[in-house]
Image (cartoon, rainbow, N blue to C red):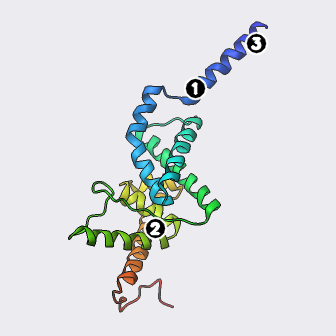
Amino acid sequence: MTLSDVELLQGRARQADDVLQMDEEAFRSLYEQTARGVWAYLSRMTGDAHLADDLLQETYYRFLRARASFETDDHRRNYLFRIATNLVKDTRRRNRTVHVALPDEEGPGALSAPGDAEARAQVRADLSRAMAKLRPRERSLLWLAYGQGASHREIAEILDLKTASIKLLLFRARRRLAKLLRLRSGAPARPWRNSEERS
């Protein structure tokens, strides 16, 4: 083995160490800060807690393998959600069936409705059925905005969309969800139609 071979091997070893770009402590901290939110997102988008567990592992694996550099913690978090979004899309393409799960617990992300547990359960069931009828991108937009509290800029980065379009896309997704919920509840249709619905 020549000196140049040794230097080459040492360079490759340094590159392998650089793949992770974070030590175990930094990764553990990142995982503790983000795993619950990423898992909740995956669970809501796939409707399957066990699949969400698998996709969560794959998300962090791909994150570590990406060799990406990040300016801020928010950028790192958004990148994780972008990976998770792509994994859900891949899974959806393979399965073509999506169920939307809603949280059963009280707290962040849980539905709050006045009244007893039965009324909250009914609201959850209605919302779950309505969300399942939305397009995948609409579900992602709504969950990121209202389930995760992501900003328009963050949503655009995660879903690979233009920031300027997020406001309109969220408006349309909310309007479609509201329409589905009205149909479900048997509420009368609006007596007017907006400009998009006019012929």
Residue 74 horizontal/vertical position (percent): 41, 43
Q: Residue at horizontal 41%, vertical 88%? A: 193
Q: Examine the image and state in which quarter residue 89 appears.
A: bottom right
Residue 93 point in image, percent of width and height: 63, 61
Q: Residue under label 1, please give it.
A: 18
Residue 184 image position (x, y, % from top left): 39, 81
Which label sits in the foreground, 3 or 2?
3
Q: Quadrant of the N terminus?
A: top right
Quarter residue 129 falls in: bottom left
Q: Which mark is residue 169?
A: 2
Q: Which structural element holds mark 3?
A: helix
Residue 192 versus residue 94: which sits nearer the camera? 94
Q: Which residue is mark 3?
A: 5
Q: In the image, what residue type sits under mark 2?
A: Leu
Q: Are marks 3 and 1 in contact (CB under 8 Å)?
A: no
Choose mark 2 or mark 1, whichever is in front: 1
Amino acid bearing label 1: Asp
How far is disc 2 from disc 1 in space, using C-alphas? 39 Å
Residue beneath the point at 42% across and 67% down:
170
Which residue ends up furthest to the front in the rendered image? 118
Task: Say above or below: 59 vs 99.
Answer: above
Vertical arrangement, residue 105 with respect to residue 189, above or below: above
Label 2 secondary element: helix
Residue 140 coordinates in the image, percent (x, y): 47, 61
How far apart marks 3 and 2 lie (CA) works out to 55 Å
Q: Nearer the viewer, residue 193 or 105?
A: 105
Q: Residue at x 55, y 35 (%)?
A: 64
Label number found at residue 112: none
- The CA span between labels 3 and 1 is 20 Å
Earlier in the chain: of badge 2 and badge 1, it is: 1
